[in-house]
Image (tube, rainbow, N blue to C red):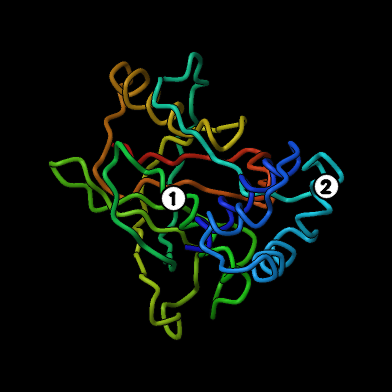
């Protein structure tokens, strides 16, 4: 719901910057009963009043929650991966189950989990992970937005923990914007794996977000670790 509200406020900000005059009408469309209530929430989230955004005629000074569109088309090019043996790790975070063809709610899941990063008991700081596991024959899997922990003791009650064993991985580097992740994953499964002597293992596939990754901008690069044998 926080993500939905942020998106609606961002769309309203664009309308105001374009010159929308009926602020009360925009407030009512968003479910607020008064101009004052809408203005209070708008200012809390975006740092400016609706009138100020309209007067500025631009959203350039605002931090907006923009849509992220993810393509499923295979990437045109894919560098060869490095093959590594990963150590056993314990992951802890928030999990949701998805249709693999529609993971569009994952950004909102990360937004919720992001508030916990840096405050999780026994957290090994500096790296975050996305873990895909529990794949079924109908095309569904669990996705865990998570960090590594030294022990699963004392993690928040709403968290799920996953023990990842020592495993050989093909590690691919994704250097572009985060929104292109599905193109890279599609290229791995549709282009690289069918032509590789390595075979995929149905286990925990990892996205590894190191300190160089800027979660706010979606840039900086990250790695996709595919278990192989």
Q: Could you say where residue 101 lies in the image, as x and y percent from the top left?
A: 30, 36
Picture quarter with the C terminus: top left
The residue lying at 68 percent from left, 49 percent from top is: 22
Q: How many other residues sit within 10 Å of disc 1, few (<14), some (14-19) or many (≥20)?
A: some
Q: Quadrant of residue 116?
A: bottom right
Q: Upstream in the sequence, badge 2 or badge 1?
A: 2
**Where is residue 17 shown, x and y percent of the image?**
76, 41
Closer to the eye: label 2 or 1: 2
Disc 2 designates what residue?
Answer: 61
For this rendering, which residue is in front, 178 or 2?
Answer: 2
* Vertical comparison of 10 with 183: above or below: below
Do tag 2 and tag 1 residues touch (Cβ < 8 Å)?
no
Q: Position of residue 72 (x, y in %)?
A: 39, 26
In front here: 103 or 63?
63
Label 2: few (<14), some or many (≥20) within 10 Å? few
Residue lying farthest left?
Answer: 137
The residue drawn where x is 62% and y is 50% is 210
Residue at (43, 65) in percent of width and height: 91
Residue 19 falls left or right of residue 95: right
Could you tell me residue 173's position as x and y percent? 55, 33
Residue highlighted by disc 1: 106
User: On screen, 198 above or below 32?
Assistant: above
Indicate left or right for 5 with 84 as reference.
right
Q: Which residue, as the protein is rendered here, is positioned at the far bottom?
A: 154
Side of 51 relative to 120 (left or right):
right
Element assignment for label 1: helix
Query: Which of the pair 8/168 is nearer the observer?
Result: 8
**Distance from the alpha carbon under mark 2 to that under mark 1:** 26 Å
């Amino acid at each position: 719901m926080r993500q939905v509200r942020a998106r609606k406020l961002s769309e309203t900000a664009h309308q105001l910057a374009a010159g929308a005059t009926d602020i009360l009408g925009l407030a009512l469309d968003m479910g607020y009963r008064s101009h004052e209530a809408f203005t209070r929430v708008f200012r809390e989230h975006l740092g400016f009043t609706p009138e100020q955004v309209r007067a500025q005629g631009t959203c350039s000074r605002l931090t907006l929650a923009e849509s992220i569109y993810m393509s499923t088309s295979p990437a045109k090019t894919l560098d060869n991966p490095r093959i590594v043996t990963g150590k056993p790790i314990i992951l802890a975070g928030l999990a949701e189950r998805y249709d693999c063809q529609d993971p569009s709610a994952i950004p909102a899941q990360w937004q919720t989990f992001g508030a916990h990063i840096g405050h999780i008991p026994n957290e090994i700081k500096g790296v975050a992970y996305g873990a895909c596991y529990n794949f079924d024959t109908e095309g569904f899997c669990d996705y865990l937005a998570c960090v590594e922990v030294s022990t699963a003791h004392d993690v928040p009650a709403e968290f799920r923990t996953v023990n990842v064993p020592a495993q050989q991985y093909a590690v691919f580097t994704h250097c572009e914007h985060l929104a292109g992740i599905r193109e890279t994953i599609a290229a791995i499964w549709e282009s690289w794996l069918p032509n590789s002597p390595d075979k995929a293992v149905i286990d925990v596939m990892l996205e590894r977000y190191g300190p160089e990754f800027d979660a706010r901008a979606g840039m900086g690069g990250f790695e996709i670790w595919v278990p192989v044998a």
